[in-house]
C-alpha cells in the first residue's frame, strides 16, 4: 500500500493508505524524495479558511476530494521515477502533487530536476515559478527603483530573482523584523514600511494586507506601477484611489500563476516556465527559504505546528526512502 496525507477537517490531518497501481500508457510511478509545505495556500486549507465561493478555483492539479475536506491537497513534490518511459526511469522530477510516498501521474506532469539542484531546494519550484511569472508581468527595466512588499515565500522569491537584475534600487519591505534575516541571506536591503524609499518605478505587493497595498501606492513615483500578487479570497480590501492617485497617474495590475504572463504566453508553456524555475534553483541563496525539516510520518503534527508559527517559510518533508 502507498500512503498519502489528507486534511480531514479544519485543523486536523492524517496519513491514509492508498491502493498501489501500475502506470498506464503515458504514465509513470514516482517515489517521493521530498515534498514541501509553504505558509500560503496549504495552511489556508489546513485551517479550513478557503471560502466556498473560491474552492473550485483553489483546486490543486492532483487534488482528491473537495474543500474544505476531507481532501488530499499539496503541490510541491520531488521524487524519482521508478517505472515509466525509459528516458525518465531513475531521474529526479518535480510534480505538482500532494504529499504521498508514491504516486502515478501522466509523464507530461513531470519536469526533470537539474543535477545541480538539491532535492530539498527543488521543492521551491512552484514558488519560484510564481515569481518568474510575476516578473514577466512586471517587466522591470534597467536602473529601476523597486520595492517588494511582503517578505513571505512569494515576495521573498521575487526579491531573490530581482537581486540579479541591474536595478537602481531594491528593497524588501515587511512589518516583521524576523524577515530581515531572509533579506540578509539574499543580500537585499530590508526595510520597515515606514522606512522604505519612495519614488519607486515599480512596486510588487505580496503582503495580502490593506496596509501593504496602501503603502505600496504611496511608494510609487509619478506614473509608477504596482503589481498585485496577493490573494484576498472573499475579502474586499479598501484601495486608496483618492488623494493623488489620479493626478500621479498610478497603475495597479494583477499577476497570478494560473496562466503564463501575457508577455510570454505565445512563446512559453507552463512546462517551460516550471523548467526555468527549477534551473534558477541552482542558486544556493534559495536555501534561506527552507526553515524546517520533518519526516512524512509526522506530517499531521507538523501541519498543526506550522499553523501556529508565523516565522516559518517552507517546511521540507522527508520520506523513508528519500536518501
Image (cartoon, rainbow, N blue to C red):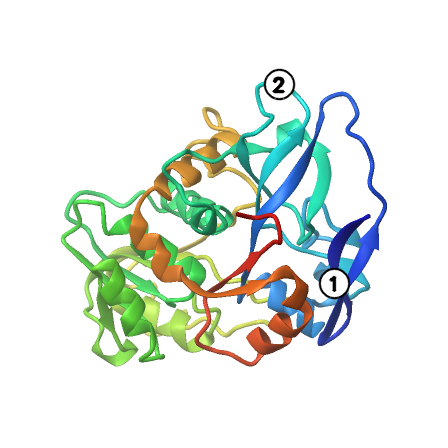
Do callouts 1 and 2 mark residues in contact (Cβ within 8 Å)? no
Q: In the rendered image, which quarter is residue 17 located in?
A: bottom right
Numbered disc 2: secondary structure: loop
* Residue 234 in sight here: no
* Viewer-closest of 280 and 219: 280
**Mark 2, residues whose alpha carbon is within 10 Å: few (<14), some, or many (≥20)?**
few
Q: Which residue is mark 1?
A: 53
Q: Earlier along the polypeptide chain: callout 1 or callout 2?
A: 1
Numbered disc 1: secondary structure: helix
Q: Which mark is in front, 1 or 2? A: 2
* Viewer-closest of 206 and 236: 206
* Viewer-closest of 146 and 302: 302
Q: Position of residue 228 (x, y in %)?
A: 44, 58
* Residue 84 in sight here: yes
In the displayed structure, 233 sits above or below 106; it is below
Residue at 69% of width from left, 53% of height from top? Answer: 57
Q: Position of residue 70 (x, y in %)?
A: 82, 63
Q: Which residue is mark 2?
A: 86
Q: Position of residue 18 (x, y in %)?
A: 83, 50
Amino acid at each position: 500500500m502507498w500512503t498519502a496525507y489528507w486534511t480531514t477537517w479544519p485543523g486536523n490531518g492524517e496519513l491514509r493508505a492508498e491502493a498501489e497501481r501500475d502506470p498506464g500508457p503515458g504514465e509513470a510511478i514516482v517515489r517521493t524524495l521530498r515534498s514541501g509545505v509553504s505558509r500560503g495556500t496549504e495552511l489556508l486549507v489546513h485551517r479550513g479558511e478557503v471560502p466556498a465561493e473560491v474552492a473550485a478555483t483553489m483546486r490543486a492539479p492532483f487534488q482528491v476530494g473537495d474543500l474544505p475536506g476531507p481532501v488530499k491537497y499539496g503541490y510541491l513534490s520531488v521524487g524519482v521515477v521508478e517505472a515509466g518511459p525509459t528516458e525518465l526511469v531513475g531521474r529526479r522530477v518535480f510534480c505538482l502533487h500532494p504529499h504521498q510516498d508514491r504516486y502515478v501521474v501522466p509523464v507530461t506532469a513531470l519536469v526533470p530536476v537539474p543535477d545541480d539542484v538539491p532535492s530539498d531546494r527543488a521543492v521551491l519550484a512552484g514558488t519560484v515559478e510564481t515569481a518568474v511569472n510575476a516578473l514577466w508581468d512586471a517587466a522591470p527595466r534597467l536602473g529601476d527603483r523597486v520595492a517588494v512588499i511582503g517578505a513571505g515565500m512569494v515576495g521573498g522569491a521575487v526579491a531573490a530573482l530581482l537581486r540579479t537584475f541591474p536595478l537602481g534600487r531594491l528593497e524588501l519591505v515587511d512589518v516583521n523584523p524576523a524577515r530581515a534575516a531572509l533579506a540578509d541571506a539574499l543580500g537585499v536591503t530590508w526595510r520597515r514600511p515606514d522606512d522604505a524609499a519612495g519614488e519607486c518605478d515599480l512596486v510588487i505587493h505580496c503582503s495580502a494586507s490593506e496596509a501593504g497595498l496602501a503603502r505600496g501606492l504611496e511608494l510609487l513615483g509619478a506614473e509608477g506601477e504596482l503589481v498585485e500578487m496577493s490573494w484576498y479570497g472573499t475579502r474586499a480590501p479598501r484601495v486608496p484611489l483618492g488623494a493623488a492617485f489620479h493626478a500621479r497617474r498610478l497603475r495597479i495590475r494583477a499577476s497570478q500563476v494560473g496562466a503564463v504572463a501575457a508577455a510570454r504566453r505565445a512563446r512559453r508553456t507552463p512546462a517551460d516556465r516550471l523548467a526555468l524555475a527549477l534551473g534558477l534553483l541552482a542558486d544556493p541563496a534559495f536555501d534561506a527559504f527552507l526553515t524546517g525539516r520533518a519526516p512524512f510520518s509526522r506530517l499531521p503534527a507538523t501541519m498543526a505546528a506550522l499553523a501556529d508559527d508565523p516565522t516559518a517559510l517552507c517546511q521540507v518533508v522527508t520520506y523513508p526512502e528519500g536518501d
